[in-house]
Image: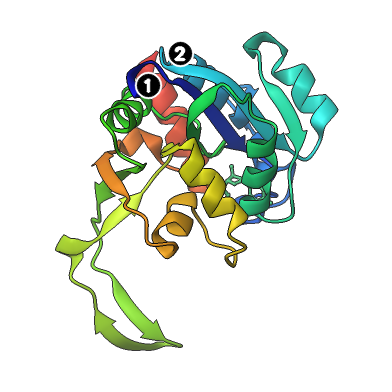
Amino acid sequence: MTSRATVGVLVPAAGLGVRLGPGAPKALRELAGEPLLVHAVRGLRAAPSVGPVVVAATDVALVEELLAPYDVVVVAGGAERQESVRLALAALDPAADLVLVHDAARCLTPVSVVEAVVACLRAGAESVVPVLPVADTVKQVDGDRVVATVDRAALRAVQTPQGFQRSVLERAHASGLPTLTDDAGLVEALGGTVTTVPGSEEAFKVTRPLDLLLAEAVLAARA
Ligand code: C5P
């Protein structure tokens, strides 16, 4: 049954993108002449497994117009990412048994990562995150004082799309847990199991101005 389940995708795209500097909401900043969100949704549509897509945006009418060619539902996002995901989930086609949550800001995520997350869900995982090893040494600090050096070998940087059996994600978002920076974190907090699959360096999140330069270079290399 799970192998034929419909895969829905929620795209939180209602963030302001303060770290990117002044300007439009982050999802609407341009990369090679098109908003990051358009790149992200085009990438999702290129993935054979992806079915219904719901985008949570700040300007619903504008985003509906931008995404008209891509068959998506657009809803108003919330004040926090978690709220934007919850609102998008409420609008997702009930036929979708598997749900991916994908940041608009990870606009160049390769199709292979999307498909790897779906394959892991179809194999029975309840929650899945794509991850990469951590390149930097990571230290825990208290103000400007180092408290500890964390064992890098045991750390992973987490990307999106994160994948869930729909019932697991619904439970997580109905739990009333305080705001976290990702959806798998909610599942972990409720004692659920989260499985990792390999991510991709090209699935980086456009957060700071340098990331836009990197994204331009990745697009140029692909062309
Ligand atoms: O702020 P951060 O980079 O973690 O945001 C990750 C994703 O969540 C972005 O795609 C952003 O647009 C989205 N977001 C949202 N609603 C918010 C805040 C962030 O949809 N209130």
Give the left or right position of residue 156, taking residue 214 as reference: left
The image shows residue 100 at horizontal and vertical percentages of 47, 34
Q: Mark 1 points at which residue?
A: 111
Position above or below: 8 against 70: below
Assess disc 2: are there few (<14), some (14-19) or many (≥20) residues with their C-alpha within 10 Å of its C-alpha.
Answer: few
Report the amino acid beneath label 2: Ala
Position above or below: 119 against 156: above
Q: Name the residue under label 2.
A: 46
Front residue of this view, candidates 74 and 222: 74
Front residue of this view, candidates 175 and 1: 1
Q: Residue farthest to the left?
A: 153
The answer for how far apart the CA atoms under marks 2 and 1 are is: 7 Å
Q: Residue farthest to the front?
A: 1
Under circle 1, the secondary element is helix
Give the left or right position of residue 40, taking residue 133 as reference: right
Could you tell me which residue is drawn at 39 percent across and 59 percent down?
188
Report the amino acid beneath label 1: Val
Could you tell me which residue is drawn at 81 percent across and 35 percent down?
59
Residue 112 visible in the picture: yes
The image shows residue 80 at horizontal and vertical percentages of 67, 56
Could you tell me which residue is drawn at 43 percent across and 55 percent down?
187
Question: Which of the 4 image quadrants contains residue 126?
Answer: top left
Position above or below: 21 against 85: below
Front residue of this view, candidates 143 and 60: 60
- Please tell me how many numbered marks the rendered image carries: 2
Assess disc 1: are there few (<14), some (14-19) or many (≥20) residues with their C-alpha within 10 Å of its C-alpha.
Answer: some
Could you tell me which residue is drawn at 48 percent across and 58 percent down?
186
The image shows residue 128 at horizontal and vertical percentages of 34, 42
The image shows residue 3 at horizontal and vertical percentages of 33, 19
Question: Which of the 4 image quadrants contains residue 88?
Answer: top right
Judge: label 2 CB < 8 Å from ligand 1: no
